[in-house]
């Protein structure tokens, strides 16, 4: 990949961290995401971009996985493993966003501190899938913008070019 293309991709990732849609489970609950979680998603996406500079693979964030599982849990019951994953990720995200001065923590009766290996694998697959969906949405938007610019340019050229023959 050329240096120019690499720089363009990096800029696209940074813009995507701020502008990409939040991937939620279909069912109409996406508009109920709390504002603090939306902010956490943006901040974690920016941090994820910094990790990529150090050579790590780009993936969805903990906050994005939390948002997705939040909306999934409102749409249908989660099985035991996904409930554990949701409580684990919610604990991580919630405690990271709360200040120590607030005194608010995840209640002990639903706090999950660790996952088994299969649950970790499921969570990592979910985060990769979320990132792929987000990147695909960005690419489709970029393609649409390029197509629109091309059509506008062609329309301008046609309007500026005199017609030689009219039938």
Image: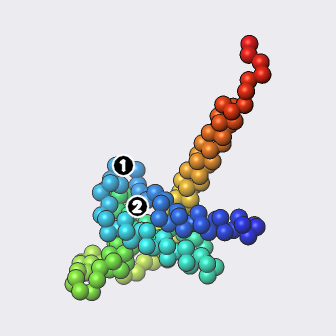
Give left or right: position of 100 versus 68.
Answer: left
Residue 61: percent from left, percent from top: 47, 70
- What crowding class fits label 1: few (fewer than 14 Cα within 10 Å), some (14-19), or many (20 or more)? few
State the residue in front, 88 or 47.
47
The residue carrying mark 2 is 68
Number of residue marks: 2
Q: Residue at x 55, y 78 (%)?
A: 50
Q: Which label number is shown at residue 136?
A: none
Image check: 78 left or right of 163? left
- Secondary structure of the residue carrying numbered label 2: helix
Secondary structure under badge 1? loop
Q: In this rendering, does residue 145 appear at all?
A: yes
Res 38 → quadrant: bottom left
> In the rendered image, is residue 91 in sight?
no
- Residue 99 image position (x, y, % from top left): 28, 83
How far apart marks 1 and 2 lie (CA) works out to: 11 Å
Question: In the drawing, does residue 18 fall left or right of residue 94?
Answer: right
Q: Residue at x 51, y 70 (%)?
A: 124
Instruction: Locate the C terminus by quadrant.
Output: top right
Front position in the image: 146 or 128:
146
Name the spot of residue 121 as percent of width and height, x first: 52, 71
Give the vertical position of 119 relative to 162 (above or below).
below
**Most foreground residue, 54 or 126:** 54
Q: Is residue 103 above or below residue 38?
A: below
Looking at this view, name the residue that lies furthest to the bottom. 100
Which residue corresponds to mark 1? 27
Can you say whether 34 is above or below 76 in the image?
below
Indicate the quadrant containing the N terminus: top left, top right, bottom left or bottom right.
bottom right
Horizontal and vertical percent for residue 9?
Answer: 64, 65
Give the residue drawn at x 42%, y 68%.
41
Instruction: Identify the image quadrant of residue 135.
Output: bottom right
């Amino acid at each position: 990949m050329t240096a120019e293309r690499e720089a363009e991709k990096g800029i696209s990732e940074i813009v995507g961290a701020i502008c990409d849609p939040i991937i939620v489970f279909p069912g109409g609950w996406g508009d109920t995401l709390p504002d603090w979680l939306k902010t956490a998603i943006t901040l974690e996406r920016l941090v994820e971009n910094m990790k990529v500079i150090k050579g790590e693979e780009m993936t969805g964030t903990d906050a994005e996985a939390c948002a997705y599982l939040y909306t999934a849990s409102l749409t249908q019951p989660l099985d035991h493993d996904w409930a554990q994953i949701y409580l684990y990720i919610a604990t991580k995200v919630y405690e990271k966003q709360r200040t120590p001065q607030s005194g608010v923590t995840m209640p002990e009766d639903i706090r999950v501190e660790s996952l088994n290996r299969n649950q970790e694998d499921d969570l990592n697959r979910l985060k990769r899938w979320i990132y792929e969906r987000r990147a695909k949405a960005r690419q489709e938007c970029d393609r649409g913008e390029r197509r629109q610019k091309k059509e506008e340019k062609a329309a301008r050229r046609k309007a500026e070019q005199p017609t030689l023959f009219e039938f």
